Image: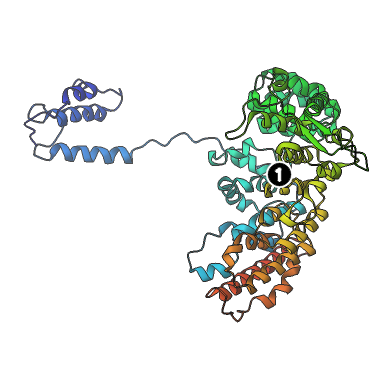
Amino acid sequence: MAMRRPVRGAGNCANKHDAPAGKTRTGGDPVSGKWDDWIVAALLGTARREVPDVTPGPWGLLDAAAEEVLRRRAGLTPATGAPLPGPAPADPRPPTPREAAHRLATLLADRPRTVGAARRAAAPDLTELLPQWLTAANAHGYAPPPELLPDLLDAARSRTDLRPAVLGYAGPRARWLAGLNPRWRFVLRAAPGPGSSLPSVDDPQAVARVWREGLFAERAALLDTVRGHDPAAARALLRSTWDAERAEDRLMFLDAFRAGLAPADEPFLEVALADRSRNVRATAADLLAALPGSALAARMAQRAAACVVPSPAPASASEGGPAGIVVTAPRTCDPDMERDGVLARPPAGRGERSWWLGQLVEAAPLATWPGRLGVPDARAVLALPAAEGWRDDLHAAWCRAAVRQGDADWARGLLGAPAAPGAGGPGAVSLAERAKLLAVLGDGERADWVAGFIATHGLSEAFQLLGGCAVPWSRPLGRAVVDALNIARDAGSYPWSFSGVMGLAERCLDPAEGERLTGLTATPDESEDAAPGAGGYWAESFQRLLGTLELRAVMLAELSPDAP
């Protein structure tokens, strides 16, 4: 093997790898020194560099190198064994019933189907049933099969919507596994599940130690626990380290005040209004505005009332009371308004004055307005006309205030009757606002309103409203949905126009309603006005819906403690 010309850059490589002949760089293995010499000879050429301990011939150097590589691979010294992990913590909950555990394995193993579209239309999507299975299992308080824990954590890793339910079901062993596999690191950032070893709230020294030394998830869970037991102690705990916390942690800790928010929280929240983080200040202002008796709410009410005044009724009017509302929007956003949470810069396309007015009205207690405008209640306020086109701005702000303050009377007035023309009340300017207002109402009232809405207006705008209804849907709501789907089928529309509602029905319709679907699974006779093939597609869609409801019924039966 003779190399006539040196390789470009060989000098640098030679300097890097060269070593005096006969010496080793490792100090213990003479072959390692030969290897360095062989590298230099290969770079410079065997004609210019003598190759020690190599059989003469054109392939001697390559043969020797190949032999050395094999020797190194075969002669690796075993690494020192790592210490075994400690045992997994015990899970005191009862085990998941055998058939239900088998069902869980099937749900976790399901993958998107690769068969034809017709088969997909008729087959239930098992991955969409997993959240419901987990919710039911958590309601029964079962412990998971240990062999399925890795698959559960992998599912939660890829689907963030599953994480709360998965971590609640996985229990204390999820954190133990997460410490052994960096793929599941998200578990360590989440709140501890059932069985986690938080200290007793009656042990102040242990509480203080975990608060100082624990992971964020442990500290957040500890703050929630202490707050549920003694809100004053929770505030003192948070105040002790508030100035040293990171901005994102202060924000998360402050958000815990939403549960059980009370007037006693006001002094601490007033301190947070001066926080160096804008997000923390905004959250503190939002919480204070949700306390109608807070000083911030009073300040906002005073500012808003100066902008929104009643217009006097004409002298010829037979009854007293205002003729309407006159609005004078703020002309500036002063530092005091900004400190109380008013954002000075409006979003693109929004005027400054209307932006400031909306924030003031939103933060003012709703009880301010009947007395201020001289009318008896919320419905009378909403019926008043507003001059110069301010009506929509006022009603949109009152929508946000009703949601923030949880005022059901104002929510009902803003929603209006479900059968009203235009599908909304005086303040419902969008589906998103109606969905938020409905969340203020109780489950039964909300379901009845949506059922009435569907009966009058159909399903074209109902998807977002249905998503906020309690599962399983009440009987009136479920029947309204099935009747509307049947009407759409008879009208000859294609079913994929209602695929979103169909998907919700698979997850939310009461399985007992499956009996009403049996007659809809047959292919109907198509009228001349129907879309070609629509009847067959509807039959497949109803078959899939019925099959999913039957599967959900079996799932719930398997999870019952009395299941065989």
Residue that carries the numbered disc 1 in the rendered image: 90
Residue farthest to the bottom, as pictured: 525
Number of disc labels: 1
Report whether 491 appears left or right of 254: left
Residue 529 in percent (x, y) is at 57, 76
* Residue positioned 63% across, 79% down in the render: 522
Residue 273 in percent (x, y) is at 73, 21
Q: Nearer the viewer, residue 180 or 138?
A: 138
How is the protein colored in the picture? Answer: rainbow
Q: Residues within 10 Å of mark 1 (few under 14, many from 20)?
A: few
Q: Nearer the viewer, residue 468 or 231?
A: 468
On the question of residue 22 being in view, the answer is no
Check the picture and name the quadrant holding the N terminus: top left
Q: Is residue 243 above or below residue 324?
A: above
Residue 87 in percent (x, y) is at 64, 41
The kind of residue on which mark 1 rests is Ala
On the question of residue 213 being in view, the answer is yes
* Residue positioned 16% across, 29% down in the render: 43
Residue 163 in percent (x, y) is at 64, 45
Report whether 279 appears left or right of 416: left
Q: Is residue 508 above or below residue 315?
A: below
Q: Quadrant of residue 16?
A: top left
* Residue positioned 16% across, 26% down in the render: 10
Q: Quadrant of residue 283?
A: top right
Disc 1 element: loop
Q: Quadrant of residue 62?
A: top left
* Residue positioned 89% across, 42% down in the render: 377
